[in-house]
Amino acid sequence: MNVNVSGTKAFYNSITGSSLCDCGYCRNYRLQIKSAVPNVAMYLDFWGIDIEKPLETSPLESDENGILEYCCCQYIVLGNCEPEYHHKIADIEFRVAKSYPSTGIEQEHFVLEFSPIKLKYIC
Ligand SMILES: [Zn+2]
């Protein structure tokens, strides 16, 4: 992974709260993700990525206990990355996303995704 850390950091700093997705699943994710998986937050922070500003999260249906599983959490990263990149923290796996929404970014970038993330649905 060849990350432009300062560029990535500047990109995340430029994202304002009002441009983030306002759906309940995304709000639920942003509220809890940092405290739920602090080691993942630290890993992303190392690359300049703000864990509270995902490009996209894809939740499955919540189960009978109100636990919501996010089957992929995607983040924009400036730089480039070998397609077979793989990283693991506990049971959470990181890889390069193949499909994701339009990023609207012209600089060289890729999308990093990880899963699974399980959070209580509180929103
Ligand atoms: Zn959303």
Image: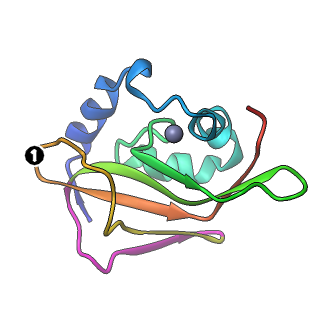
Establish if 91 lies above or below 104: below
Q: Position of residue 123 (x, y in %)?
A: 73, 32
Q: In which quarter of the image is the N terminus?
A: bottom left
Establish if 109 lies above or below 121: below
Establish if 98 lies above or below 18: below
Question: Could you tell me which residue is drawn at 42 percent across and 54 percent down?
Answer: 74
Give the left or right position of residue 79, taking residue 23 as reference: left
- Kindly state the secondary structure of the residue where label 1 is placed: loop
Give the left or right position of residue 55, taking residue 92 as reference: left
Question: Could you tell me which residue is drawn at 76 percent across and 54 percent down?
Answer: 62
**Which residue range is magenta in the image?**
79-90
Give the left or right position of residue 111, taking residue 93 as reference: left
How many circles with numbers are drawn on the protein?
1
Q: Where is residue 37 in the image (x, y as percent from the top left)?
A: 65, 50
Q: Position of residue 75 (x, y in %)?
A: 38, 50
Q: Does the residue labelled 1 lie within 8 Å of ligand 1?
A: no
The image quarter in which residue 19 lies: top left
Residue farthest to the bottom, as pictured: 84
Q: Where is residue 8 in the image (x, y as percent from the top left)?
A: 26, 41
Q: What residue type is labelled 1?
A: Gln
Is 53 colored magenta in this rendering?
no
The image quarter in which residue 10 lies: top left
Give the camera-side residue of 44 and 68.
68
In the rendered image, which residue does mark 1 sit on? 107
Give the camera-side residue of 6 and 62.
62
Question: Could you tell me which residue is drawn at 40 percent across and 47 percent down?
Answer: 46
Q: Residues within 10 Å of mark 1 (few under 14, many from 20)?
A: few
